[in-house]
Image (tube, rainbow, N blue to C red):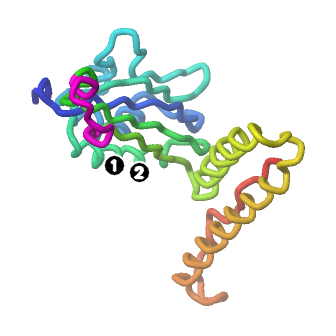
Amino acid sequence: MSRFNAPFEIHVHGQVPLLVGVTFEQIQEALKPLWKYTGARSLADAAGSAYEDEPGIQHNVTEQALQMCWTVRGDEDFRQALDEMCMNLNEVASDGAAIEITFYDTEFDEEDREEEHLSDDESRDDFVILFVGPTPAAIMQVQRDLLVQDVVNMMERHFDGAVLSGVVAEIDKLFTQRFDDLVNSLELGKPPRGMGGSGHGNGRRPRHLH
């Protein structure tokens, strides 16, 4: 399937820690939505990026991690492939991870924008962060860490980092409440105690790193 005229160049960037023993075949199956989207017959055929200076998709055996710095041409339907990929990666990830996705509008000409004084709204560029992990707690931990990093970096322009512990504590409270709400929603679907229902398997809270 040719995508030479696709409206977007889509860059996928991230590193996912893998469970011990995960094989290349398992990674290939987890990433099947991506390489099938390109029209390839295997991950090996699609692992190279559209740009030679990008390493593409690699299984780092030494670090037991999946590394992605990979660009492909595509359209909005690529988002469905990403959703399927994330669901698959949850099964092989050993910890939470963030995957950054950037959509570059290939039909938007920056020089034309400057000459015609067009606004940035004319561009369809987009940036999203997707999260994967073996449990909801692992995913929330990555979300929490990224938020803390962003907030602290912004506030350190105005305040000393040593006085921001209270801000971090409030962020932790928000994520703790979110996690408790998730657990409670799952508990509603469980049989009463003593009726043979199994316990919630993802009961550990996100770590609070101060």
Identify the residue at the far top of this view: 52
Whether residue 41 is visible, yes or no, is: no
For mark 1, give the secondary structure: helix
* Picture quadrant where residue 115 is located: top left
Give, as a single range, the part of the protein colored magenta. 112-124
Q: Provide residue 59's location: percent of width, then percent of height.
A: 47, 23
Q: Amino acid at mark 2?
A: Met
Query: Where's the N terminus, which quadrant?
Result: top left
Q: Residue at x 82, y 42 (%)?
A: 159
For mark 2, give the secondary structure: helix
Q: Distance of mark 2 from mark 1, alpha carbons?
A: 5 Å
Residue 194 located left or right of residue 54 = right
Q: Residue at x 66, y 87 (%)?
A: 193
Q: Is residue 60 above or below residue 32?
A: above
Give the number of the disc on residue 84: 1
Q: Provide residue 164's location: percent of width, then percent of height.
A: 83, 49
- Camera-nearest residue between 75 and 49: 75
- Camera-nearest residue between 143 and 152: 152
Q: Main secondary structure of the magenta part?
A: helix
Give the number of the disc on residue 87: 2
Whether residue 88 is visible, yes or no, is: yes
